[in-house]
Every structure is written in structure tokens, then in C-alpha cells.
Amino acid sequence: WQIFALIGFLEFWSELSTPNHKHYMAGGKPGDYPDFISGPDGIPHPVPFNLYDPFQFSKNMSEEKKATRLRAEINNGRLAQLGIIGFLSEQCAPGSVPLLSGVVQPYDGEPMAPFVTNYLGSMVGMN
């Protein structure tokens, strides 16, 4: 439940508009979260670090270098997603990814089992 609470908080926080942060539907950048600031425009208690660049390493970085690093980060995320799908494919259909043949153990269960059962509904008697 902690991860769902964190995701819920981040979704709530991403919808905020502050004087220094525009909402993505009002001309802001998608995925750009407002800074954690204390006071009337921020959260009620101090938070020492922001989500992006908590130690302020990139405050003097050029926009071109930031754009290059953003592109690299997006491509790394895409590559990680492909890797996970490759491992899942090899587990479900042995031989489907030749480089992983013999490396990954076959799995004959249901890989989407967490999404098959309505766990929230089953707690209140609904299936």
C-alpha cells in the first residue's frame, strides 16, 4: 500500500500549479514536478530534497546538456522496458529470445496473475 500512497501523492503533486511551475495542460512540461517548498504555496513541513536533482548538480548545466541527458534517460527507460519484456517472453515461450535461451528458466504459470484477480473487490465481497 505504501507504493500506491506514494504514486497517489506524486499524481496529486504533479497536478499543482505554483508561481514557478505551470501545469502541463497550461503550457508546462510533462513530467516536470513542482519543487518541494515550505510555506503557504507548498507543503506544510520542510522537505530537504526535490525529486529531480536533489543536490543541485545541474543548476549550472547548459540547456543543451540537460536535453542530451533527458534523451539518454528516456532511451535508458525504453531499453529497460524492452529487457523486461524480453525476459518475460523467454519465460513464457522458451526459445523466443535466442540470446536468453538456457539463461532464463521457463515459467508455466500465469504471468499476469496479479491482474487477473480483483483484490480490492474481493476484500469487500465482490469478485
Image (tube, rainbow, N blue to C red):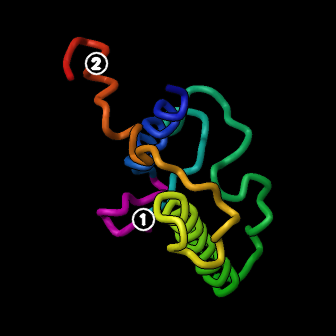
**Quarter holding residue 123:** top left
Task: Point out the frontmost of discs 2 and 1.
Answer: 2
First in sequence: mark 2 vs mark 1 = 1
Front one among 55 and 105: 105
- Image quadrant of residue 117? top left
Q: Which residue is mark 2?
A: 122
Q: Is disc 1 placed on a helix, strand or loop?
A: loop
**Residue tagged 1:** 30
Callout 1 amino acid: Pro
Is residue 16 visible in the rendered structure shown here? no
Furthest-top residue in this view? 124
- 92 is higher (above) or lower (below) than 12: below
Which three-letter amino acid code belongs to the residue tagged 2? Ser
Q: Secondary structure at mark 2?
A: helix
In this rendering, position of residue 25 left or right of residue 50: left
The rendered magenta stretch, by its main secondary structure, is classed as loop
Q: Residue at x 54, y 65 (%)?
A: 90
Rendered location of residue 1, percent (x, y) = 49, 26
- Place of residue 79 in the rendered image (x, y in percent of width and height, measured from the top left): 59, 73
Relative to 58, say whether 120 is above or below.
Answer: above
Position of 11 with respect to 39 (left or right) is left
The span shown in magenta is 19-29
- Please state the horizontal and vertical placement of residue 22, each as a whole percent of the image: 41, 60
Q: Position of residue 119 (x, y in %)?
A: 34, 25
